[in-house]
Image (cartoon, rainbow, N blue to C red):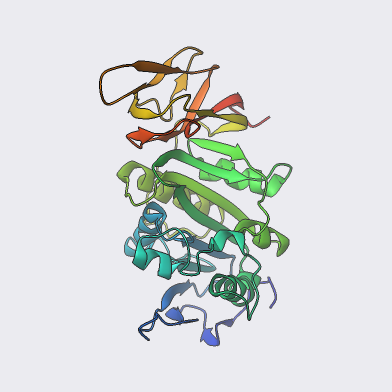
Amino acid sequence: MSKNPQKTLTILGETILPGESKTIYMEIAKLHNTTKLKIPIIVQRSKIQGPIVLFSAGIHGDEINGVEIVRQLITKKINKPKTGTIICIPIINMFGFVNKSREFPDGRDLNRVFPGTKKGSLASRFAFHILTEIMPIVNYAVDFHSGGASRFNASQIRLIQNDAELKVLADVFNAPFTLYSKNILGSFRNSSDKLNVKMLLFEGGKSLDINVSIAEEGVNGVKRLLSHLNMLDPKHRIDEQKTPTIYIEKSRWIRAKCSGLLHDSNTIGSFVKKGTLLATITDPFGKFERKVKAPNDGYVINANHSPIVYQGDAIYHMSNLMSNSGE
């Protein structure tokens, strides 16, 4: 299908005309008890031609914060465009969402099996249908994620380097942080890039959790992006960020040097100086207390919120080279 604006769109055999709203259900497989499991795809079209934008979440079934962001786009009618077409998929991995699990029932990470195959594993089949039925018509996309397990991500956009158009979109979205991150083989973002879909990946919060401020930052970023594309209905107020996004070019993980109970100092999202106390690791019997200090000046962009850690666990993600302008 052409990337150019079309009078008629067809998704999974369903036709959507200009000015029409339609919910299309993708049904690839049933549950083991024969119950149908449908993935709603909410499509809103303006009568005025324009870009086609996708907002998706829940590719990992336990990353609820992204689901909440896309839900708010729908309930607040931000997904009703002034021009063009907006496609919302609040939950891609419905199987994982039902089970509060990151993976598909076949144990695979959906975000590592793209582009998928028509007759492969269950996850692979889903990836194949998303990539062949939806992405060929999409111009721009934002895929919403959260930190895995108990690791809490400060709101951030991830994009590849040396893509001028993506850089402009990241500046417009204006999340607190923007990380340069290579496309991972088998990921949704990597396969979308090969189809020339300009995709931003949003990370914020942690799994099995809804964080109000993270959701607000995601929704506000979407409004700024849609305004830039001349797609935002004027009735929606735009909350401008007072400061530009902070670009992070290099970062490092700090790992626990011992097992124990983790007492976080709540520095997530903050700039800290070398030697700042990030956390204390203790044993449960009062025998020791070991401090975790920042190894360099930088921003704390991820913090492990698990109360129990093991030696070698990733507990903080810190920048060690950053720029306010992305230069």
Q: Which of 149 and 175 lies nearest the eye of the viewer?
A: 149
- Residue ranking furthest to the left: 285
Q: Determine the image quadrant of residue 264.
A: top left
Q: Determine the image quadrant of residue 34.
A: bottom left
Side of 56 where 280 appears, left or right: left
Q: Which of 174 and 295 lies nearest the eye of the viewer?
A: 295
Quadrant into which the N terminus falls = bottom right
Give the vertical position of 201 relative to 116 (above or below).
above
Q: Determine the image quadrant of residue 63.
A: bottom left
Q: In this rendering, does residue 90 appear at all?
A: no
Q: Position of residue 104 (x, y in %)?
A: 48, 66
Q: Which of 139 and 194 lies nearest the eye of the viewer?
A: 194
Which residue is painted at 52% across and 66% down in the image?
83
Quadrant into which the C terminus falls = top right
Q: Which of 42 and 228 lies nearest the eye of the viewer?
A: 42
Give the vertical position of 264 relative to 223 (above or below).
above
Which residue is painted at 67% across and 62% down in the image?
191
